[in-house]
Amino acid sequence: MSRKYTQFYSLHTVKKQQFTGNVELNRLLEAGDFGIGTFNDTNGELIAIGGEIYRTCHDGSAEKITDFSEKTPYSIMTKFFPDETHNISQHLNMDEAYSYFDSLITRPDHIHAVAINATFKKICTRAPKPQKPPYKDLQTLISEQKESHFENIEGTIVGFYTPDYLSALGVPGYHLHFIDNARQHGGHVKSFNLEQADFHIQLLDEISVINPGGDQHINHKSRKAA
């Protein structure tokens, strides 16, 4: 079973306002069926689930991607086969959900893919507006993003846990995107309260980074996970 974490570009690239990549979306699906990212010109948040890619837009709406020649400046993909699935029948907020995932992680120095299928009493998301060069810096872009609030909605959170020492690769801690079951709403997760949920987690022990040069890449196999 593959446990490879494949990242197209690094977090450093978007921090440096490099929002134009040359990786087409069809290449993401070659790397996996599960992931998160963004689109060129910050044209929405990206979520890959079940081998399909969706864009969540500035207004909180979602749309299925059909043009796989569209490109990404930053995305993360894996083939998702959860090591563990746990059903929770209680109310949890986001911090409590993080703590629950923390309790499942026995190797905190490894990246993990995580997912939550749940009924959300409340969930708050955000997504950027499309830009044209010259691009705004990442912090300005985030500060200007519109929040979308949803209540009593069923859906899936998709994301990754990244240890602090790999912060040059991805957001340290948990980086999560949401899409509802109707595939009509979603975005980058800011907060939530859930009621009934299935928590899924998978340890990843190999890292592949596709750099902005196109086909340049770095592969790293963790020895500790053997």
Image (tube, grey):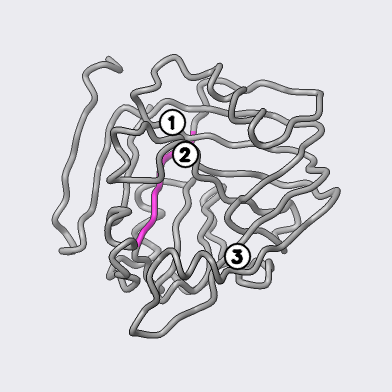
Residue shown at the point (61%, 61%) measured from the top left: 126
Q: What is the three-letter code of the residue carrying label 1? A: His
Q: Does 173 lie within the magenta span?
A: no
Residue 56: numbered disc: 3
Give the magenta part as a residue range: 74-80
Q: What is the three-letter code of the residue carrying label 2? A: Phe
The foreground one among 151 and 46 is 151
Image check: 33 left or right of 221? right
Report if the CB atoms under discs 3 and 2 are less than 8 Å apart: no
Q: What is the three-letter code of the residue carrying label 3? A: Thr
Image check: 102 left or right of 157? left
Residue shown at the point (54%, 18%) measured from the top left: 104
The foreground one among 34 and 111 is 111
Residue 48 pos. (x, y %): 52, 53
Question: Which quarter of the image is occupied by the N terminus?
Answer: top left
Residue shown at the point (45%, 63%) measured from the top left: 38
Mark 1 surroundings within 10 Å by alpha-carbon count, few (fewer than 14), some (14 through 19), many (20 or more): many
Q: Quadrant of residue 187?
A: bottom right
Question: Which quarter of the image is occupied by the C terminus?
Answer: top left
- Element type at mark 1: strand
Is residue 179 depicted above or below 104 in this figure? below
Q: Earlier in the sequence, mark 1 or mark 3?
A: 3
Residue 160: numbered disc: 2
Is residue 154 depicted above or below 81 in this figure? below
Magenta segment's dominant SS is strand
Residue 112: numbered disc: 1
- Element type at mark 3: strand
Cα distance, mark 1 to mark 3? 23 Å
- Element type at mark 2: strand
